[in-house]
Image (cartoon, helix red, strand yellow):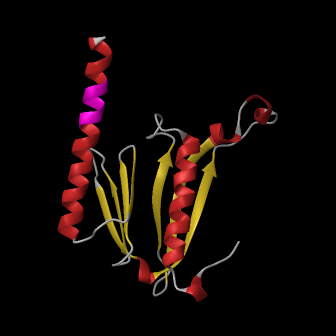
Amino acid sequence: MTTVIVPLYSFINKRIKRFLNFKKLAKRCKVCFSKQDILGSKFIGLDILKRKLLYIEQNHENPTCIVIDVSQVEKCILKKQYDSIDAGGLKKRKLHDYLATVFLQLSFTHHSKLVHLPFFEKNKDKNLDVEEVEEKAKEWEIAVSKLLPVNKVERA
């Protein structure tokens, strides 16, 4: 019984510490999250009142922190990239087994630069449930799109 509890405690403890670090960073950036998620080593939070989106990816080599002013965003689109599928491959495996990346693509009103916020990367996030990540990414696309000015919301 102890061998199961110790790794589980360690996992939960690391997750809590990581979340507290995100809270400290949010406090430093002066944002208060109305929506937030942790997906593996990635954290995303949205402050609806200040219209700010905070994205953090903690890598040992190159940590990333991005604060985006949503009022400057023109479009928010959920993008998925798949690995190549062999002929007849979908008879044996599901489509999400071929999923390589899931990310939000943000385009801005005043410049043509695009920002990609990855939610899932196959080579980094092998332990995540792909279907759950896809659901959360869709929720984030909707949440950010609701904050865009009405005339700039693109309908599918």
Q: Residue at x 52, y 47 (%)?
A: 133
Q: Is residue 98 left or right of residue 129?
A: right
Q: Residue furthest top?
A: 1
Pick the front one: 112 or 68: 68
Question: What secondary structure predominates along the stretch shown in magenta?
Answer: helix
Q: Is residue 75 above or below residue 129?
A: below
Q: Position of residue 50 (x, y in %)?
A: 33, 78
Number of labels in the image equals 0
Question: Is residue 10 highlighted in magenta?
Answer: yes
Q: Is residue 91 above or below residue 50?
A: above
Q: Position of residue 58 (x, y in %)?
A: 30, 49
Q: Residue at x 57, y 58 (%)?
A: 138
Q: Is residue 134 left or right of residue 55?
A: right
Q: Position of residue 115 (x, y in %)?
A: 45, 68
Q: Residue at x 39, y 43 (%)?
A: 40
Q: Position of residue 3 (x, y in %)?
A: 29, 13
Question: Is residue 26 highlighted in magenta?
Answer: no
Q: Is residue 104 left or right of residue 66?
A: right
Q: Where is the C terminus found, in terms of image quarters?
A: bottom right
Give the extent of the magenta segment: 8-13
Q: Is residue 138 above or below residue 123?
A: below
Pick the front one: 101 or 134: 134
Q: Where is the N terminus found, in terms of image quarters?
A: top left
Pick the front one: 96 or 30: 30
